[in-house]
Image (tube, rainbow, N blue to C red):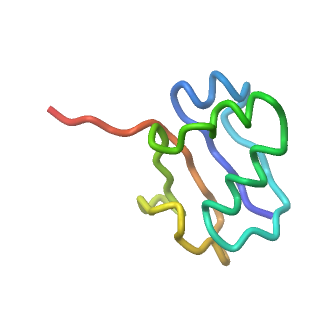
Amino acid sequence: MVEVRYFAWLRERVGTDRETIDSSASTVGELVSDLRQQSEAHDLVFSDLSAIRAAVDQELVDMDHPIANAREIAFFPPMTGG
């Protein structure tokens, strides 16, 4: 089981800020594939991965990053600085 957190517009579109997922996924990308099966809202949120960033245990990662032993996986829009 892993806690999945959503931020900004992802939270609004999925309808929750967090959920606990039981998945056999080994990477963030595989988890995204599982999440897309959850609902139409999940599928829509993850339809354009160029608009989403991910973090595993608060460390920014790519979609091919392993998630073994992760406690939390977060998804959010790209960050901008100024």
Nearer the observer, 47 or 12: 47
- Residue situated furthest left in the rendering: 82
In the image, residue 46 above or below residue 68: above
Residue visible at 57% across and 49% down?
A: 74
Residue 79: percent from the left, percent from the top?
A: 33, 38
In the image, residue 71 above or below residue 75: below
Q: Quadrant of the C terminus?
A: top left
In the image, residue 71 above or below residue 17: below
Quadrant assignment, res 14: top right
In the image, residue 41 above or below residue 53: above
Quadrant assignment, res 23: bottom right
Q: Quadrant of the N terminus?
A: bottom right
- Total numbered labels: 0
Residue visible at 69% across and 63% down?
A: 30
Residue 41: percent from the left, percent from the top?
A: 75, 28
Residue visible at 53% across and 61% down?
A: 63
